[in-house]
Amino acid sequence: MKKALIIFLFFAILIGIFAPCLAENTPNELQVKKMYSSPTFDSKLVYEIPIEVKLLEISEDANWYKVKIQFYFGPACFKYTGWAYIPVGQALAARNNRLVSSK
């Protein structure tokens, strides 16, 4: 009985570790797995994110981003989905105004 329980726990941990790798990405979900030192792929890799981070949606004003964060700790799955305020839309509008006014 103990041997069967150990084998079951071993397979449960393996499934918990490898299940996220086997999941399919939908076209609207963008994976964020690597951080680079500059905005080019040939730049230095700064950090590889060990958890699943997906960008799900962007608001119309491009200032709010729906993000899903998910990670596994053994057989337990922790999942958080919510909206993050990152004022990219405002920064792009301000940059565009500076470029137009400098011409």
Image (cartoon, rainbow, N blue to C red):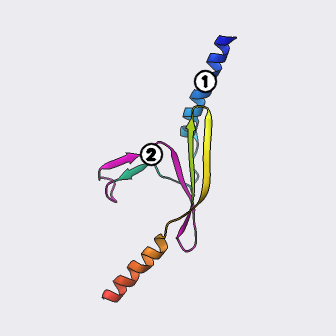
Residue at point 62%, 39% (across, down): 77
Up the image or down, 19 lies above or below 39; here it is above
Spatial CA distance of label 1 from label 2 is: 25 Å
Residue 29 in picture, x, y percent from top left: 56, 55
Quarter residue 37 falls in: bottom left
Residue at point 67%, 14% (across, down): 4
Q: Which quadrant holds the C terminus?
A: bottom left
For this orientation, the residue located farthest to the right is: 1
Q: Secondary structure at mark 2?
A: loop
Q: Secondary structure at mark 1?
A: helix
Residue 3 in picture, x, y percent from top left: 64, 11
Q: Residues within 10 Å of mark 1 (few under 14, many from 20)?
A: few
Residue at point 39%, 52% (across, down): 35
Does residue 42 belong to the magenta stretch?
yes
Q: Residues within 10 Å of mark 2 (few under 14, many from 20)?
A: few
Residue 50 in picture, x, y percent from top left: 47, 42
Up the image or down, 93 lies above or below 31; here it is below
Q: Which residues are magenta?
A: 37-65
Up the image or down, 11 lies above or below 37; here it is above
Does residue 45 belong to the magenta stretch?
yes
* 70 left or right of 44 in image: right
- Label 2 sits on residue: 49
Q: Amino acid at mark 1?
A: Phe
- Label 1 sits on residue: 11
Q: Amino acid at mark 2?
A: Ile
Residue 85 in picture, x, y percent from top left: 53, 66
